Image: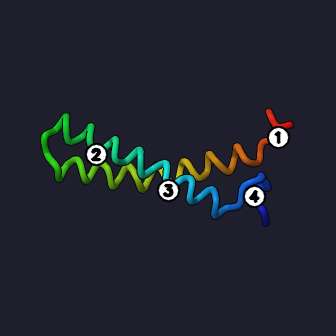
Amino acid sequence: MILFSGGDTHSRSVLKAISWRTLGTLDTFAISWFLSGKVGLAGSIAVLEFATKIVWYYLHERLWAAAPWGRR
């Protein structure tokens, strides 16, 4: 069963999700370190944030890829 039939392949969506989250996670790590002053805590936050947000981004990307709205 195909859940999404958008223009992008699943591999492309996964790679986009990983590259975007890498940038976002570096930002989260820097902010967490700045606010807490603790590298270990900042790292823990960044790892958890990476794992959860990559799943949400992938699902978000696939839903938008399947939506016909706004396409020519």
* Residue at the limit of the structure toward the bottom, as seen here: 1
The residue that label 1 is drawn on is: 68
Q: Residue at x 54, y 53 (%)?
A: 17
Mark 4, residue position: 3
Mark 4 is on which residue type? Leu
Determine whether, in the image, residue 62 is placed left or right of residue 33: right
Q: Nearer the viewer, residue 61 or 71?
A: 71
Crowding near the residue tagged with mark 3, few <14, some 14–19, many ≥20 C-alpha atoms within 10 Å: some
Callout 3 amino acid:
Ile
Q: Which mark is residue 29?
A: 2
Could you tell me the amino acid type at mark 1?
Pro
Which badge, 2 or 4, comes first in the chain's sequence?
4
Q: Secondary structure at mark 2?
A: helix
x then y, percent, for residue 46: 32, 50
Nearer-N-terminus badge (4/1)? 4
- Mark 1 is surrounded, within 10 Å at the Cα level, by few (under 14), some (14 to 19) or many (20 or more) other residues, namely few
Do labels 1 and 2 touch, CB within 8 Å? no
Q: Nearer the viewer, mark 2 or mark 4?
A: 2
Nearer-N-terminus badge (1/2) = 2
Calculate the distance from the C-alpha at mark 1 to the C-alpha at mark 2: 36 Å
Whole-percent x and y of residue 25? 37, 48
Looking at numbered disc 2 in the image, what kind of residue is underneath it? Phe
Residue 6 position (above or below residue 70): below
Residue wearing tag 3: 18
Label 3 to label 1: alpha-carbon separation:
25 Å
Query: From the image, which quarter does the C terminus lie in?
Result: top right
Q: Which of the marked residues, 4 or 3, is nearer the chain's N terminus?
A: 4
Mark 4–mark 1 Cα distance, whole angstroms, equals: 14 Å
